[in-house]
Image (cartoon, grey):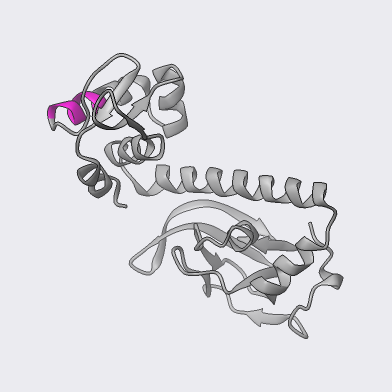
Amino acid sequence: MLDTSLLPLSESAAPVAAGTVLLHRGDAVDRIVHVMQGRVVLGVMVDGHMAHQLGVVEGPFWLEAASGLLALPHAVDAVAETEVQVQYVSVGDFVAEVKVLPEASQTLLMDMARSQRQQTEMAVSRLAKDADARCAEWLLRHAQPDEGVGGLAVKLTERKRNIAAQLGIAPETFSRVLRHLRERQLISGGGRVLGLPNPQALRELAGA
């Protein structure tokens, strides 16, 4: 990762008590947190407590640097499990340092950021949403305009077993959810092309 000595970090490490919320999922990223020491829990909070835990990271570690680089809101909640020592760098300064790297390094770093973000979003979706919501979200993410169905459609380029694995559900569950969505007229057609006659209803089901 980037050498912290090259970044305009806060002057000294600030101690943060255990239980402190360091990041709120969905908030805009205005600064990037560098955890120097201590452990931080990542996951999804519900009603003020960590209801779904993705994992634990230990300093030195950059929290949600990928979201800062991609100009996206935080993908996870982060809570100090122990007392932690943190420093901060503004997103603008962080991005500026990335832009002075060789072009190949910039490309690699951005590709890694996009990959990490996608994996994190999928992990959060598995934790916080039921099978129906995950499937709806997946369909919307892969939807493309299709004149044949007169609107949006999804072309299934992978086996249903593989798609189910991506969603963290059994193949039988994936088939059952598709059947329910069809009964509710949220998808149409069959085979390798699924029409999406009511994208707004799918968005509501996905919690978007």
Q: Can residue 36 be seen at all in this image of the molecule?
A: no
Residue 178 counted in the magenta span = yes
Q: Is residue 16 magenta?
A: no
What segment is highlighted magenta in the picture? 177-183
Percent across and percent down for residue 130 are: 30, 41
Q: Return the x and y of residue 69 as percentages of the image width and height.
A: 64, 60
Q: Is 53 rendered above or below residue 118?
A: below
Which is the main secondary structure of the residues drawn in magenta?
Answer: helix
Identify the residue at horizontal 41%, vertical 34% (top origin). Answer: 142
Is 125 placed left or right of 40 in the picture?
Answer: left
Q: Give the quadrant of the N terminus.
A: bottom right
Where residue 127 appears, x then y in whole percent?
Answer: 41, 46
Nearest the eye: 8 or 141:
141
Going by the picture, which residue comes out furthest to the front?
147
Quadrant for residue 89, please give it: bottom right
In this rendering, the answer to whether 17 lies above or below 155 is below
Q: Position of residue 71 (x, y in %)?
A: 56, 62
Determine the residue positioned at 22% across, 29% down. Answer: 187
Residue 150 higher or lower than 44, as above or below = above
132 is higher (above) or lower (below) than 67: above
Q: Is any atom of residue 201 visible in this view?
A: yes
Tell me if 6 is positioned left or right of 70 in this view: right
Can you name the residue that lies furthest to the top here? Answer: 191
| Left or right: 107 in relation to 184 | right
Q: What residue sits 37% from the left and 49% below the top?
A: 128
